[in-house]
Amino acid sequence: KVWLLSDPDERDDFESVRDNLWIEGIAASDFPRDVELSFTYRNGSAEATDTVLISVIPLEVSVFPDEDPIEIDADHGAVNLIAGVFLPTPEDELAPAEDGTVVEWEIATGDGGLLSETSTTTEDGYSLTTLYPSRTAGSQYTARASTESVIYDGWPFEIGPYSAVSTPMTVIPGSAADVVVSIPGDPQPYAADGVDTFVIEATVEDAHGNSVADETPVSWDLEGLGGYGDEEPEAIATIDGVATTTLVSGFLETLQQPVVQVGAAETAESVVN
């Protein structure tokens, strides 16, 4: 195919004229190596023709971390995202795009999140931004990194867009920050006979109102007479943010005070016995 190149700057030194050519119809997935192009330069009646061999190679864009799943602790509330922009070499190795290649970022899926930067540049082939998701457990996000040009030999070439999407990222509950003890049905007072029982619940949330993760250990103690129906109440863990045990009455009419501790969160509830 013959391409006509003009000298837009009308400079005498043709070697200093650089033009970008967009070649359509060559599938990068086919990895053609020796594509022959014929260039004709005309200046009045003078004409020069030359042919060159080019290799058509794809650009590789990746987003890290790429493990699955990616979990974001609600307390931490952020995850660093890294885009890698690399070019295959003739030796089928990967070489980083030159520094300064522009990467555009966007949240592909998910609501309520923010990116620290939406336009970044590469250094040693990598470019960084930070995702700040909502603090609601269960929220899911993906982020997209794309580039429409790459710097090669100091010159920007329009190539795109090339893009990559991160693996899904999910917000998980933070550590326990609040615990509330409740008595379903509020049956108090109950008989001081050492036999009577009722169920008590501890509802545990993180600092953002999320139920803590299942199997969060809950420590139970008791001030006053009586005890717990569970032999090892300290081993009771949460399910859907709630830990449940049974309180057993004492033999004297008094107050029982279940004390619940989960991490740094602690509370107590008085019960008439």
Image (cartoon, rainbow, N blue to C red):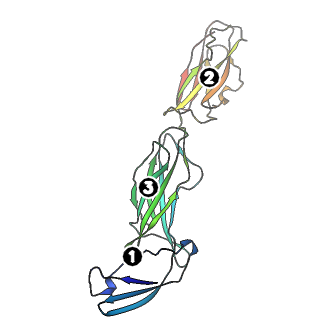
> Can you identify the residue that label 1 sits on?
20
Pick whichever of labels 3 and 1 is earlier in the sequence: 1
Closest to the observer: 16 or 188?
16
Residue 234: name its quadrant. Answer: top right
Q: Dot 1 lies on which element?
A: loop
Percent x, y of residue 176: 54, 33
> Considering the image in quadrants, where does the C terminus appear?
top right
Identify which residue is drawn at 37% across, 74% down.
Answer: 155
Number of residues whose C-alpha sits closer than 10 Å to that of mark 2, classed few (under 14), some (14–19) or many (20 or more): some
Closest to the observer: 137 or 144?
144
Using the numbered discs, state the Cα–Cα distance from disc 3 to disc 1 in whole angstroms.
26 Å
Amino acid type of disc 2?
Answer: Glu
Amino acid type of disc 3?
Answer: Trp
> Can you identify the residue that label 3 sits on?
105
Identify which residue is drawn at 34% across, 86% down.
Answer: 15
Q: Is residue 4 depicted above or below 251 in this figure?
A: below
Callout in the foreground (3, 1): 1
Identify which residue is drawn at 51% across, 59% down.
Answer: 164
